[in-house]
Amino acid sequence: MKKILVITFSIIATIAICFFSVQYIIGALSGLNESATENGRTIVTKKSQALQAEEKRIEDKARLQEALDQINEDYLQLKLDESPSEMKVIDVLHEMVHQKVKAEKKWGQIPMHPKTIEQVNKVIEQGNFERKTELLDMVEKWEDGNFSTADEDHNFLWSIKEGNVGKAYGILSLQEEIKYIHDHFID
């Protein structure tokens, strides 16, 4: 009888330990979006911080889209001839990418907008340019919303134009880009 009690108690204790261990592990892994209090201060969990950062990014993207939607339609019509020179297309791309990059000096601006990207892409596709492949690759990234190399794109175009002032040294934050749009394209 004593043996049965010991075995039963051991089984119950093992089950309880497993249950609480699983609960602890699940709680730790799920990164519950709760706060803990330590010395009277609220500490936000890492998941909560990550969620807040993602929410801010989504809000900023929505604000960017709002700004893009407010651009005067006149700015969205590229004034390109039917068959512009490669240098004219490079000028347009260069002025478009100014919206995305940090640089000491920027001369000229054209909105980096789905409509302008589409227009310049058609011109490049129809053109017979020495750098057609590189220009198409760049614009196709932009069409996909990929501006992660905008500073490199700028400097590629800038070097073709033999620029000596205004080399890009980074990418604007969404807030900086929104300000740029408001400063240059919203009447």
Image (spheres, rainbow, N blue to C red):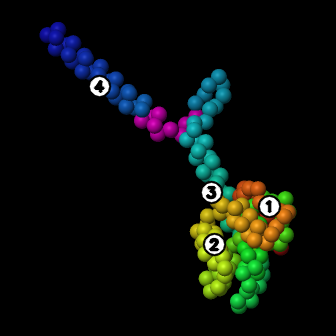
The amino acid pointed to by label 3 is: Ile
Find residue 79 and report its horizontal and vertical position in percent.
77, 85
Cβ–Cβ under 8 Å for marks 3 and 1: no
On the image, numbered disc 1 is attached to which residue? 167
Q: Quadrant of the N terminus?
A: top left
Mark 1 and mark 4: span between their CA atoms? 66 Å
- The residue mark sitting in front, 2 or 4, is 2
Q: Which residue is mark 4?
A: 15
**Mark 3 — residue?**
58
Residue drawn 62% across the image and 57% down it? 58
Q: Is residue 115 visible?
A: no
Give left or right: position of 176 versus 145.
right
Against 137, residue 18 (above or below) is: above
Could you tell me which residue is drawn at 38 percent across and 27 percent down?
20
Point out residue 87 in the picture as x, y percentages from the top left corner. Answer: 75, 79
Q: Along the polypeptide, which appears first: circle 1 or circle 4?
A: 4
Residue sitting nearer the eye, 185 or 95: 95
Q: Secondary structure at mark 3?
A: helix
Which of the two residues, 18 or 85, is positioned nearer the viewer here?
85
Residue count near mark 4 (Cα–Cα under 10 Å), binned few <14, some 14–19, many ≥20? few
Say which residue label 2 marks.
134
What is the C-alpha distance between the residues marked 3 and 4? 44 Å
- Secondary element type, mark 2: helix
Residue 48 lies, with reference to residue 117, above or below; the image says above
Amino acid bearing label 2: Glu
| Residue 77, numbered circle | none
Name the amino acid, label 1: Lys
Q: Nearer the viewer, mark 2 or mark 3?
A: 2
User: Of residues 178 and 99, which is closer to you in this image?
Assistant: 99
Q: Are marks 2 and 3 in contact (CB under 8 Å)?
A: no
> Which stretch appears magenta?
26-35
Q: Is residue 117 above or below residue 150?
A: below
